[in-house]
Amino acid sequence: MAIGFIKPHSILIRILQEASETTLTFDSFILPMQCPPVPWVSSHFGAYTLSPVKLMRCQDGIVQHELLLDECPHDHLCLVLDALNFLGNCPWKVNQPVLDVIISIFNDKGDEKLDIPPPPSWEAKELAKQLAESAPMSRMALKWKMAQCRKKTRETYSLRMDMLYKLSIAKHMKDEVFWFPHNLDFRGRTYPCPPHFNHLGGDFTRGILLFAEGKPLGSRGLDWLKIHLVNLTGLRKKDSLRGRLSYANHIMPDILDSADNPLTGKRWWMDTDEPWQVLACSMEIAKAVRSPKPSEYISHFPVHQ
């Protein structure tokens, strides 16, 4: 009696792999909160309302840190807890225009220069094209080249899924005000509890976050925004603050073009050190300079030091 196996056709497998990703599900404790965090009142109570979280991060099974915290007098922890509560009570929102530009590039072909990995199908086509155009090689060299291609494909896929996580959270929260509860590592450094999407992330994560509560720029606020933008470009690292401000005024046409036409204009912002933050800052400067009174313009833009 013959035994046979049924398997899907390779073309069907490829179609399914390239189809739109399914709905992502996240645990509540890795997402930003949609209400202010519970204040830290002790080393065992604070941050999330339902999910327990440790005051000090440590590996599972290590109890020395918790025992030391239990032995620490409460009045010695008060200043630390107050600092965590102050950071956690800062409300944030999503910068929707920048998010829309990122999603547009993500859904197209990606752009490695902007740290947006291409989809797996596009990456595979590019690698196959590179192999076809390369010079004839020995069997061992070809096997090594194919191994490097597979390694790069896996790395690209991992990076793309990481960005998909972050973009999914940002899109889900785009119309909401949210908060990041904080805790400590064993050195006493503070970190947001949500790991994927927070204000300490990379360039594109910082570029899509704004303070929910704005403040007027004041008499010199616009100048500081311009200096901050030049700092993000990495083009005038050795110049004085006055020189950076002068350079920002000199390239104002490029700044406004980037804000108005990020994907169809000169795309000056793409050739900078921190392109997404530069784009976000360009949009903020454009809004400020076009307001009737820039000094009274309400800015929500965070300046990361």
Image: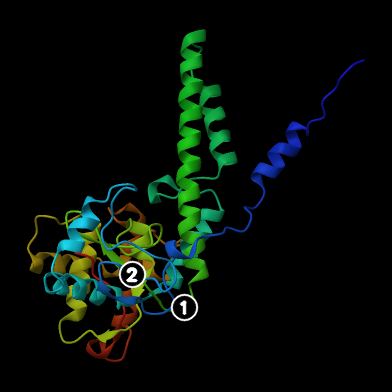
- Identify the residue at image location x=56%, y=34%: 124
Vertical relation: 193 (above or below) 218: above
Along the viewing direction, whichever of 149 and 114 lies nearer the viewer: 149
Amino acid type, mark 2: Pro
Vertical placement of residue 168 versus 42, above or below:
above
Q: Position of residue 173 (x, y in %)?
A: 48, 72
For residue 266, side relative to residue 18 (left or right): left
Residue 262 image position (x, y, % from top left): 42, 64
Q: Classify mark 2: residues with Cα within 10 Å, few (<14), some (14-19) or many (20+).
A: many
Q: Is residue 249 visible to us here?
A: no
On residue 181, the disc is 2
- Image point (44%, 77%), residue name: 34
| Quarter containing the N terminus | top right
Q: In this rendering, does residue 19 appear at all? A: yes
Element type at marker 2? Answer: loop
Q: Amino acid at mark 1?
A: Glu
| Coloration of the structure image | rainbow
In the shown orientation, is residue 137 left or right of residue 227? right
- Identified at 51% across, 41% down, the residue is 157
Give x and y (percent) for residue 216: 24, 87
Circle 1 residues within 10 Å: few <14, some 14–19, many ≥20: few
The CA distance from mark 1 to mark 2 is: 16 Å
Q: Mark 1 touching mark 2, by CB under 8 A?
A: no
Percent x, y for residue 288? 30, 81
Quadrant of the rendered structure where residue 249 is?
bottom left
